[in-house]
Amino acid sequence: AGYVLVDDGGHLKVGTKERPMEKQATIFITKGQHHDEFGTRFLSGWGSGRIDIHGRRLQRTWTLLSRTAYSGATQLFLRDDPKAMGWRAGDRIGIATTMRGRSTVHTIASIGQPISEPRGCGDMPDARRRCSIDHCRVLAGNMNYRSCDFYCQRSGFCFRA
């Protein structure tokens, strides 16, 4: 469809708070007809039209990486346990860039066992390594193109086991 409009008095309902929809659903909105008020490619309610979408409950919808993910990586290390957050294989996730560039969408293939990581910066990347679509330098501003070991010795921010 070019758009989905729930007209005045209508109700688009997918699951409820008490019984959320557990299956995957996709609404494809492609180029199509133009609506005088809303334009093209939208999902909207008009007047008293309502849209209620309730999907699988997640304890958390986002997390941070616990290790740097370089361009082309096939494995992510997360700060929080994905199973505890309610994530599962087949879910689609967005990876937001921290630099200029494009964020990307990926599908979770599998979820491994949590790994406890020691404090410190042993896995901190060397500033000369490059990442992301734009090939930004990792921590180059802080590390002045030196290695993690050099940075740790000088900064006092890192704790070795």
Image (tube, rainbow, N blue to C red):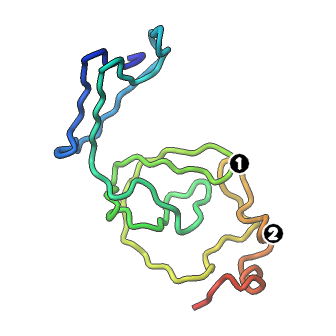
State the SS at label 2: loop
Residue 107 relative to residue 10: left or right: right
Crowd band around label 2 with a 10 angstrom C-alpha radius: few (<14), some (14–19), many (20+): some
- The percent coordinates of residue 23 (x first, y second) are 24, 41
- The percent coordinates of residue 116 (x first, y second) are 44, 79
* Amino acid on which disc 1 is placed: Asp
- The percent coordinates of residue 39 (x first, y second) are 50, 14
Outermost residue on the front side: it is 48
Cβ atoms under marks 2 and 1 closer than 8 Å = no
Crowd band around label 1 with a 10 angstrom C-alpha radius: few (<14), some (14–19), many (20+): few
The correct choice, above or below, for 91 with respect to 80 in the image is above
The residue shown at (77%, 69%) is 142
Residue 145 tag number: 2
Outermost residue on the right side: it is 144
User: Dividing the image into 4 quarters, which one contains the C terminus?
Assistant: bottom right
- The percent coordinates of residue 146 (x first, y second) are 80, 74
* Amino acid on which disc 2 is placed: Tyr
User: Dividing the image into 4 quarters, which one contains the N terminus?
Assistant: top left
The residue shown at (30%, 21%) is 49
Outermost residue on the bottom side: it is 161
How far is disc 2 from disc 1 in space, using C-alphas?
Answer: 18 Å
User: Is residue 34 visible in the rendered structure shown here?
Assistant: no
Residue 134 tag number: 1
